[in-house]
């Protein structure tokens, strides 16, 4: 770094340090005086035609006068001043000027240099062209109003205004009744926290100031109590709207916060002189009130004159834009000073505005309150738009609805009872209604209700007729009366009488434009004579009584909500002609269900139906008469039926049947009240809810299924192993004697039988019902065909041996072909297959799930294979009988071969197997019948049966042969060796010469399995 650069850096550091020290010294030693000027003054100094020259006496008030006071004070003291002005929206000047509301920006910012202004939140909802007013050069201060990004004003409003000249951080909170407003207290706290966060990073601390624009003391006191104890309290609060006696002079409420109050009149300007001490804490506040009506002559300097000339130019532009809208008679003075002509009774300006409103909306009746009507009036002749704005300087909109005569009476009754009927200002005088389309008479000398009569203009007869209590009338008012002016919104938004429509805003342009249109379309000057719409009759002593109360009804009457009056109780309805269908449902514990029932009216009269009660576990949720679900009545016409859906909840109910009544109150259709004991009847129906436990499907357990498949694998592996053993030892004598071909067939039959475990293991947990149906029919096929193959092989083998031995004993030569040997097997196999095929086609076994007999519902079910008709049982029995026949024939041939040695015949082991099978059947079949609803037990029994049958046959046929082979017990059979010892036939023993030939032939026959047997 060069020496020059180093020197510049040092100088910058020294300068910064000195400024920091100076700021600290100023904050800690010097007392800084700043000023806050608050003024609700209008833009002009008078009306549109006032102040023709700056020196004219009619130049009263306005922002030019406020600016003159401020300029004079600044010139004399040099103290900083921050001014807050109000956006003008209602004066004839802003309404008539070509720029409209945008003229505020032209005056306040471009002329007088204001960078911020305050306005009601409703400004931000206006649909007018405010493209100039919405500018970053002059923001609108609204601290408790939500301005979303979608709002055109987003980016042109401030929550806090930081004024650099005075170091004031200003917060402005206003009525929470304004559109899009947020609670003032919460908004103020958030703004104070924001100021505190900024102060943490600055040397010159900002002074938090709150402008609280609420008229009511009741609102301000709780606000003050809460905000002064906030962690970041304000240094100063100015209450705006009405002067609070306690804070008429500024005072400190604690060691940090000062409070003052001021009015909100455009003829005053309020300057708060604030003395700041260390850390910009407020040490003292003084209030100065400047009277804008009397500006001292020495303050009317050249700047003031230029300002007034500039404003006069703008006023002329507005005047040139002030069209003539019609003509009228002489309009008298309405309001000046303390005079309030419309507070005393009928006033002409009220007639004009209500007539125009009623004309615009085509309504029967129009209302407007007396409080907003004012102005000096105008001479007979032309009427300009500025005259109308002078008469009503508020940009209100029309508000229309439909009200009954009862609601209209309530509006006028309240209005007349609280109005003072004096031509001077009174607090409640503004409640008096100016009307069009009706006339009403009152007695001001009565206490309480004062209305004597109300007559409404009837277009049909073109005359006034008495107001009818239940008749519906179209009405029009303004948005202030129907939406803000308490308590009138309650009346204008009434729906107490059927057919009433709450009032709502119907136009987007001000009432003054409506009056201008009305005057324009008139063919003659508007009549400004008194019409007799409000009449005071002090001789009438009996007030009109439209309003009744429920406690006024006698025992034989009831309170009819629909007409807001007492009505006589009707006769009882005929409930025997009303029919309710039964309602019943079923639900699992903890679940819900819905059922439907129907109510029919078989009477010749219409009846009213309302729901009286339902069980605590039931609720009406839907129906063809939805109003009943909301507690309202429904007219059930003669011959009509309505349906209801009832939601029944089993959450807190125990298993079993819950029962409770659904009760309806029935009345004649013209009886509108259920309190009449004579008119009320009850009908009901008992609804039942069957509560069941969660469904028990009794599926086959995974462990049992796995066990079954393992046992099947054991049988299949065993049969396959024995088949391989037979093949490998086919030339060994014991195997050769036993005929390997038949041994292979036995292994195959057992193998097929074991595969029946697969369909037995299938249920509807993982497989569809169609798949279960196939599995059900596959099981008898596999079992029966495997069984037949096994025993037909044994039968064929034994038959062959017996045939050869018998022929040899008779010394006969025979020749057995393969067809002769396998004929029994083929016949048995074909017959069995045919029976199974017919069974499968005609009445196959199907999978069905049924309820268990030991339960009271279908929650506990089991699945099983069943046959649909008796045909299935017939085929089942035929197949069983045929299989038993095959077994019997096998046993017969085994018995015939009982004397033949085991090398050639397995009759002994077949007998053992048959006995074993018989024992299994005797034990298992009854047990299966007993436990058929227990899927797991039934499966295990079937599994055991199949496994025992298969393994017993395999082991009894093959194990002895394996033992014989291993023990070397196989021998060459000759002579009488084919018979058991001592069991040879007698003719064979005595005929030794032939025995050799016979036995040789026999051995040859029984050993030969490759070719036809010969002797």
Image: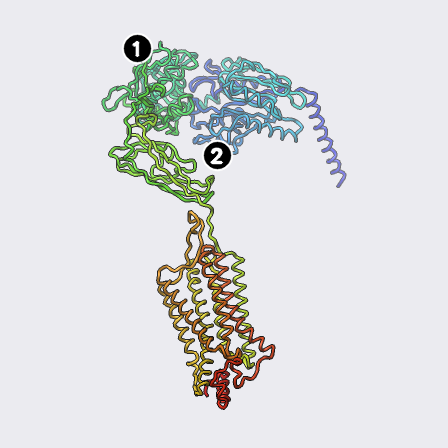
Q: Quadrant of residue 342?
A: top left
Secondary structure type for disc 2: loop
Q: Which mark is residue 540?
A: 1
Q: How many marks?
A: 2
Furthest residue in direction bottom, as rendered = 993
Residue 241 image position (x, y, % from top left): 50, 19
Residue 910 image position (x, y, % from top left): 49, 72
Q: Quadrant of residue 437?
A: top left
Q: Quadrant of residue 353?
A: top left
Q: Is residue 399 above or below residue 898?
A: above
Q: Nearer the viewer, residue 576 or 271?
A: 576
If the image is split into quadrants, where does the N terminus sit? Answer: top right
Q: Nearer the viewer, residue 243 or 830?
A: 830
Q: Is residue 668 above or below residue 855?
A: above
Of badges 2 and 1, the one in the foreground is: 1
First along the sequence among labels 2 and 1: 2
Q: Is residue 680 visible?
A: yes
Residue 990 image position (x, y, % from top left): 49, 87
Q: Is residue 617 above or below residue 954?
A: above
Secondary structure type for disc 1: loop
Q: CA distance from mark 2 to mark 1?
A: 56 Å
Q: Which mark is residue 991?
A: none
Q: Is residue 940 above or below residue 408?
A: below
Q: Which mark is residue 151?
A: 2
Crowd band around label 2 with a 10 angstrom C-alpha radius: few (<14), some (14–19), many (20+): few
Left or right placement of residue 204 versus residue 403 in this view = right
Residue at the image position 47 percent from the left and 72 percent from the top: 790
């Amino acid at each position: 770094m060069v020496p020059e650069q180093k020197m510049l850096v040092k100088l910058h550091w020294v300068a910064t340090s000195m400024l920091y020290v100076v700021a600290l010294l100023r904050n800690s030693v010097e007392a800084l005086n700043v000023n806050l000027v608050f003024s609700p003054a209008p833009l002009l100094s008078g009306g549109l035609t006032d102040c023709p020259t700056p020196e004219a006496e009619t130049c009263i008030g306005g922002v030019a006068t406020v600016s003159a006071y401020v300029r004079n004070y600044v010139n004399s003291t040099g103290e900083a001043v921050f001014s807050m002005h109000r956006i003008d929206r209602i004066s004839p000047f802003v309404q008539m000027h070509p720029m409209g509301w945008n003229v505020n920006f032209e005056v306040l910012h471009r002329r007088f240099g204001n960078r911020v202004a305050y306005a009601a939140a409703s400004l931000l909802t206006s649909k007018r062209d405010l493209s100039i007013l919405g500018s970053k050069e002059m923001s609108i201060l609204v601290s408790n109003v939500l301005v979303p990004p979608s709002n055109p004003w987003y980016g042109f409003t401030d929550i806090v205004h930081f004024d650099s000249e005075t170091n004031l951080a200003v917060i402005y909170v206003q009525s929470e009744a304004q559109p899009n407003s947020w609670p003032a207290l919460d908004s103020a706290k958030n703004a104070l926290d924001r100021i505190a966060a900024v102060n943490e990073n600055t040397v010159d601390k900002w002074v938090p100031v709150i402008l609280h624009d609420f008229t009511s003391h009741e609102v301000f006191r709780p606000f003050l109590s809460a905000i002064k104890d906030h962690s970041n309290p304000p240094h100063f609060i100015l209450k705006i709207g009405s002067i609070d006696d306690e804070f008429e002079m500024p005072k400190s409420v604690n060691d940090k916060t000062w409070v003052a109050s001021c009015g909100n009149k455009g003829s005053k300007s309020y300057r708060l002189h604030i003395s700041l001490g260390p850390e910009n804490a407020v040490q003292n506040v003084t209030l100065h009130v400047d009277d804008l009506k009397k500006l001292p002559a020495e303050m009317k300097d050249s700047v003031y004159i230029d300002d007034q000339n500039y404003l006069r130019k703008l006023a002329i532009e507005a005047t040139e834009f002030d069209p003539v809208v019609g003509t009228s008679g002489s309009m008298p003075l309405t309001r000046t000073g303390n005079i309030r002509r419309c507070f005393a009774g009928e006033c002409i300006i009220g007639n004009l505005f209500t007539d125009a409103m009623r004309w615009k909306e085509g309504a029967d009746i129009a209302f407007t309150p007396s409080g907003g009507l004012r102005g000096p009036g105008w001479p007979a002749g032309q009427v300009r738009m500025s005259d109308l704005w002078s008469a009503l300087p508020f940009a209100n909109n029309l508000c229309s609805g439909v009200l009954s005569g009862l609601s209209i009476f309530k509006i006028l009754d309240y209005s007349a009872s609280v109005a003072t009927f004096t031509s001077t200002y009174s607090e409640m005088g503004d409640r008096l209604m100016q009307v069009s389309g009706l006339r009403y008479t009152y007695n001001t000398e009565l206490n309480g209700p004062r209305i004597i009569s109300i007559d409404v203009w009837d277009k049909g007869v073109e005359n006034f007729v008495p107001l009818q209590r239940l008749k519906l009338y179209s009405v029009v008012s303004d948005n202030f009366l129907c939406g803000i002016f308490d308590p009138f919104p309650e009346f204008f938004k009434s729906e107490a009488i059927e057919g009433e429509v709450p009032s709502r805003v119907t136009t987007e342009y001000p009432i003054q434009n409506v009056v201008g249109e009305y005057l324009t379309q008139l063919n003659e000057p508007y009549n400004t004579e008194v019409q007799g719409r409000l009449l005071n009759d002090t001789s009438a002593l009996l007030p009109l009584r439209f309003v009744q109360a429920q406690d006024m009804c006698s025992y034989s009457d009831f309170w009819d909500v629909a007409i807001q009056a007492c009505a006589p109780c009707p006769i009882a309805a005929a409930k025997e002609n009303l029919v309710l269908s039964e309602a019943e449902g079923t639900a699992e514990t903890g679940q819900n269900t819905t059922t439907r029932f129907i109510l029919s009216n078989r009477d010749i009269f219409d009846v009213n139906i309302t729901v009286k009660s339902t069980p605590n576990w039931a609720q009406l949720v839907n129906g063809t008469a939805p109003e009943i679900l909301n507690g309202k009545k429904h007219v059930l016409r003669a011959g009509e039926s309505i349906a209801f859906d009832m939601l029944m909840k089993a959450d807190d109910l125990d298993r079993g049947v819950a029962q409770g009544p659904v009760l309806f109150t029935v009345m004649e259709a013209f009886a509108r009240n259920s309190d009449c004991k004579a008119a009320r009847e009850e009908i009901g129906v008992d609804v039942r809810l069957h509560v069941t436990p969660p469904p028990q499907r009794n599926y086959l357990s995974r462990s049992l299924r796995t066990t079954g498949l393992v046992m099947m694998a054991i049988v299949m592996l065993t049969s396959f192993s024995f088949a391989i053993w037979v093949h490998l030892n086919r030339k060994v004598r014991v195997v050769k004697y036993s005929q390997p071909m038949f041994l292979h067939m036995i292994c195959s039959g057992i193998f097929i039988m074991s595969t029946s475990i697969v369909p037995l293991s299938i249920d509807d947990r993982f497989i569809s019902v169609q798949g279960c149906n196939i599995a059900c029919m596959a099981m008898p096929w596999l079992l029966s065909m495997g069984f037949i193959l096994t025993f037909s092989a044994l039968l064929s083998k034994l038959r062959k041996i017996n045939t050869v031995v018998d022929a040899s004993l008779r010394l006969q030569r025979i020749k057995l072909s393969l067809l002769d040997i396998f004929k029994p097997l083929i016949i048995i196999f074909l017959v069995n297959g045919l029976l199974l095929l017919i069974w499968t086609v005609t009445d196959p076994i199907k999978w069905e799930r049924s309820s268990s007999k030991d339960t009271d519902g279908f929650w506990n079910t089991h699945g099983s294979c069943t046959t649909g008709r008796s045909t299935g049982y017939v085929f089942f029995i035929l197949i069983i009988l045929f299989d038993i026949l095959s077994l019997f024939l096998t046993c017969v041939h085994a018995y015939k071969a009982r004397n033949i040695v085991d090398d050639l015949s397995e009759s002994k082991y077949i007998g053992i197997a048959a006995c074993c099978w018989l024992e299994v059947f005797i034990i298992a079949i009854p047990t299966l019948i007993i436990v058929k609803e227990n899927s797991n037990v039934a499966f295990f029994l079937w599994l055991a049966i199949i496994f025992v049958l298969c393994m017993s046959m395999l082991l009894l046929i093959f194990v002895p042969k394996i033992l014989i082979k291993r023990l070397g017990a196989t021998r060459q059979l000759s002579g009488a060796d084919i018979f058991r010892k001592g069991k040879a036939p007698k003719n064979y023993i005595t005929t030794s010469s032939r025995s050799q030939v016979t036995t040789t032939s026999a051995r040859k026959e029984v050993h030969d399995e490759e070719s036809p047997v010969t002797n």
